[in-house]
Image (cartoon, rainbow, N blue to C red):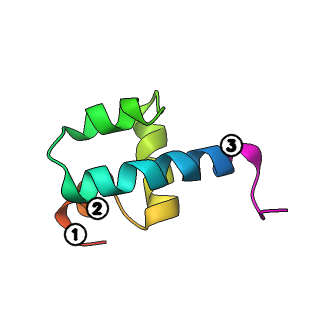
Amino acid sequence: CHGMNVSQYVNRARLLAAEPRLRHGSEPIGVVMESCGFRSKSNFNRECHRVLGGSPSAVRAGTV
């Protein structure tokens, strides 16, 4: 019904919670990643590219 599988839906929700913290916060990216429910850096990076269009550091820098 949302055009994605359950895993993608959950990861999208997690990234939408992480996005403002990456853009406007000063917490280390790893802290944001873990507190938003991601257990693996590679999965966080992959999903960040898929949902937000770039790496977590690019999101933080405002280049995405």
- Reply above or below: 39 against 5: above
Which residue is denoted by mark 1 in the rendering?
A: 62
Q: Which mark is residue 59?
A: 2
Q: Is mark 2 in CB contact (under 8 Å) with mark 1? A: yes
- Type of the residue with mark 3: Ser
Query: Is 13 in front, or is 6?
Result: 13
In the drawing, does residue 28 fall left or right of residue 53?
Answer: left
Q: CA distance from mark 3 to mark 1?
A: 26 Å
Rendering coords of residue 10 (x, y %): 63, 44
Q: Residue at x 46, y 27 (%)?
A: 39
Q: Position of residue 16 (x, y in %)?
A: 47, 55
- The quadrant the N terminus occupies is bottom right
Residue that badge 3 annotates = 7
In percent of the image, x 44 and y 64: which residue is there? 52
> What residue type is disc 2 on?
Val
Q: Residues within 10 Å of mark 3 (few under 14, many from 20)?
A: few
Question: Label 1: how many residues lie within 10 Å, few (<14), some (14-19) or many (20+)?
Answer: few
* Residue 9 located within the stretch drawn in magenta: no
Q: Amino acid at mark 1?
A: Gly
Density class for disc 2 (Cα within 10 Å; few <14, some 14-19, many ≥20) is many
Alpha carbon separation for disc pair 2 and 3: 22 Å
Whichever of labels 3 and 1 marks the residue nearer the N terminus, that label is 3
Residue at 77% across, 63% down: 2
Determine if the magenta segment contains residue 2: yes
Label 1, secondary structure: give it.
loop
Which stretch is magenta?
A: 1-7
- Residue 63 horizontal/vertical position (percent): 23, 72
Residue at the right extreme of this rendering: 1
Counting from the top left corner in percent of width and height, residue 57 is at 24, 54
Residue 57's place in the image compared with 41, above or below, is below
Q: Say whether residue 25 is left or right of residue 35.
A: left
